[in-house]
Amino acid sequence: MQKFTYFAYGMRIISTLPLHGLREATDGEASLEPSIEISVGSVPDTIEPTIEHNPICQVNHDEFLLNIHAVASYWVHAGQWVVVQPVDGADSASVELFLTTAAFSALLHQRGMLPLHGSCIDTPRGAVLLGGLTGTGTSTLAAAFSEQGYALLSDDLSVIQLNDAGLPYVLPGYPELHLWRRDVQTLELLKRERLRQLRPEIEKYAFPVDNFQRIPQPLDSIYVLQLTDDSGCLITALPDASKMVLLSQIMYGTRMAIRTDVFRKHWNMIATFAPKVRVAKITRPTQSHNVEKLIEIVQADIKR
């Protein structure tokens, strides 16, 4: 059986499934011991004991079971193995999408790594994380920065790790951005031949980027996007106590983290690095998305 070797979030990944969004491991990375092994096989119907059980997922301290109707079931265990059982006739793009998002976030939690919902770019001051809940425009803003020459570190799922001195670093993810069709049109990317539709039934596309930062970068600042009914864009720097609350709200897979011991570890990690980085909230109008204005605000604040 053919196996593919990838590298993301500081992990060497061995997979029997081709994963188009991931970066192939270099010779040096491929010689490392595998951190993650992904295979196609049978997934259990239940896991025992469970501390969270609903029609879509089951969770305990060492396992995560995800069932996506008409797509696949995913069994993530011990922070090392992922078994995928595709539904007959499921399209491979959908199988890959849920694997590299929901299943990977569970994997990262199991490994004690902090995943935040947002995109990250590399700047002269260090990594700048553009966080926010789904629909706030983090990927669109990261794509606009990428078009201006900033290197991409990650999209949608950004991982923070502390070094021995307790300083936060962002680990490189995948060299592509996930954008809705309207955002592709706004950024005039529609004619790019490399656009790949993420799922047949939704108008969302993967846009590969050439300018990708492969080396972990020190985290300089985090900007959390929020929607508002007001007409303008406003940036507000946050004190340390407010930083922690806001960052916990954009944790990827928060529900799983809260149900397991890992949330306390993540909270302690946030408490360690939050005072060392700038965290600001940016509100933007719900009814309009002025990407140029947001870039102007962030660039001005980065140069503070």
Image (tube, rainbow, N blue to C red):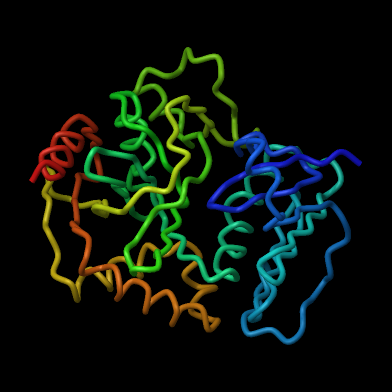
- Residue shown at the point (34%, 40%) measured from the top left: 121
- Residue shown at the point (8%, 46%) measured from the top left: 304
Residue 13 point in image, percent of width and height: 68, 49
285 versus 162 height, above or below: above
How many marks overall?
0
Q: Nearer the viewer, residue 155 or 134?
A: 155
Report if residue 226 is visible in the image: no
Name, please, the residue furthest toward the left: 304
Q: Quadrant of residue 141?
A: top left
Residue 105 point in image, percent of width and height: 56, 60
Q: Is residue 231 left or right of residue 186?
A: left
Q: Is residue 132 left or right of residue 75?
A: left
Name, please, the residue furthest toward the right: 1
Report if residue 276 is visible in the image: yes
Q: Nearer the viewer, residue 233 or 142?
A: 142
96 versus 113 height, above or below: above
- Residue shown at the point (55%, 81%) measured from the top left: 260
49 versus 65 height, above or below: below
- Residue shown at the point (57%, 47%) measured from the top left: 8
Residue 265 point in image, percent of width and height: 45, 79
Image quadrant where one finds the N terminus: top right
Residue 254 point in image, percent of width and height: 47, 70
Q: Is residue 85 left or right of residue 57?
A: right
